[in-house]
Amino acid sequence: MSSEADQDSAAESRASGGPAVRILLWVLLVVFSAINLTANTVEGWSMLAGLPSAIVVVGCAAALVAHHVKQRRR
């Protein structure tokens, strides 16, 4: 039998995303970093694919930092 506190902490970890969100953010960060690197080395692709992928990379990095800070405060 689980106590009410255990149920509350499980609900909080589901609401904060838990490890699945962190894994997804890391995968997106690596994939879009590779796209950005490739786009910036192939001439003519820099603005077409480089800029949007750079924006996604910065967003993923910011989300990972925010997720880490949120988890540390608990």
Image: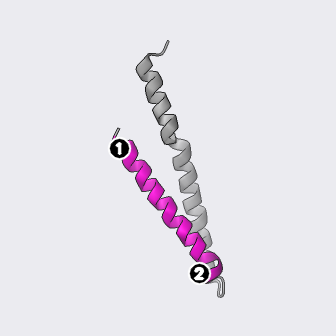
Q: Nearer the viewer, mark 2 or mark 1?
A: 1
User: Percent x, y for residue 23?
Assistant: 55, 49
The residue positioned 48% from the left and 41% from the top of the image is 16
Q: How is the image coloured?
A: one colour
Q: Height in image: 54 above or below 21?
A: below
User: Percent x, y for residue 45?
Assistant: 65, 82
Q: Height in image: 32 above or below 11?
A: below
Residue under numbered circle 1: 72
| Frontmost residue, 29 versus 11 | 11
Residue 37 in view: no
The kind of residue tagged 2 is: Asn
Q: Height in image: 16 above or below 1?
A: below
Q: Main secondary structure of the magenta part?
A: helix
Q: Height in image: 28 above or below 14?
A: below
Q: Residue furthest left?
A: 73
Determine if the magenta segment contains residue 63.
Answer: yes
Please state the extent of the stretch shown in magenta in the rendering: 46-73
Disc ID at residue 40: 2
